[in-house]
Image: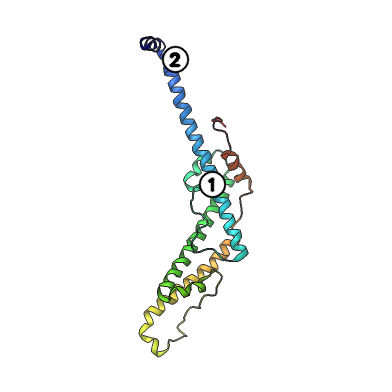
Amino acid sequence: MVHTILTWLTANIGFVTLLVGGFAIFLYLKQKRDKKRDAANLIVQEVRYAETQVRNYRASKTYPLSSTILPTRSWNENIHLFVSDLSESEIDLISTFYSQAAFVDNLINEIATFAMRRVETQGIEAIPQLAMNAPVPLELTPQQPLAPQATPAVPNVMVQEIRVTRTLHAHTILNEVSERIEFIFNSPAIDKLIRISKRKWYLLWI
């Protein structure tokens, strides 16, 4: 039996080579398509989640300090997969959305960092004062001299006030950016990614 098989393979070496090569090409194309489909699906989910977070912020004026609106950022890593599927304006639209969402995450992180420092210095009771929409103490200015008894603590006070001022600015910028973010989930660009994410595994050339 083995001898018969080996004889047949030797006699049809060209066909066998073609068959093996064709199968290898099929696997390569399938893996490439699977990667593209999975990336499209992940990007669609990221956009949907981020938009939900921004909508919640616009309604409540607060982001949870422990969360991010873009836990993962697949677009920058996979943009090359969709160059042939999306127009330049559609690519720019998605890139802008991700850029703005990432900027919001950076602001949330800065405010959360300030909150942790506040807790370290003032205790856990300081947390209620750190809601995203809570008023932040104003910056000390040279026209506001410190009381005499507070003189020895000038360096620490100034550092604290600088942090408060930075956080106040972060709140303002956070609100401005969050209000300006353009929702794209229902745009033609995301519709194309949704269609790509639903393509059947055997549609290798579509």
Front residue (pair 72, 163): 72
Q: Earlier in the sequence, mark 1 or mark 2?
A: 2
- 160 sits left or right of 197 in the view: left
Secondary structure beneath disc 2?
Answer: helix
Image quadrant in which the N terminus is located: top left
Residue in the image at 62% along x and 43% along y: 191
Between residue 95 and residue 5, name the one nearer to us: 5
Real-space Cα distance between discs 1 and 2? 42 Å
At 48% from the left and 27% from the top, the residue drawn is 26
Q: Residue furthest front?
A: 1
Residue 41: give x, y in percent of width and height: 55, 43
Rendering quarter of residue 8? top left
Residue 145: percent from left, percent from top: 44, 87
- Extreme bottom residue here? 148
**Could you tell me how many numbered marks the image carries?**
2
Residue at the disc numbered 1:
43
Q: Quadrant of the C terminus?
A: top right
Tell me if residue 143 comes above or below residue 105 in the rendering. Answer: below
Quadrant in the rendering for residue 158: bottom left
Residue carrying label 2: 15
Q: Position of residue 69 (x, y in %)?
A: 53, 57
- Which quarter of the picture shows residue 9? top left
Query: What's the residue type where badge 2 is placed?
Result: Phe
31, 161: nearer the viewer? 31
Query: From the viewer's perspective, is 90 left or right of 27?
Result: right
In the rendering, at what x and y percent does residue 188 appear?
Answer: 63, 45
In this rendering, would 54 be left or right of 11? right
Q: Secondary structure at mark 1?
A: helix
Q: Amino acid at mark 1?
A: Ile
Q: Residues within 10 Å of mark 2 (few under 14, many from 20)?
A: few
Residue 158 circle label: none
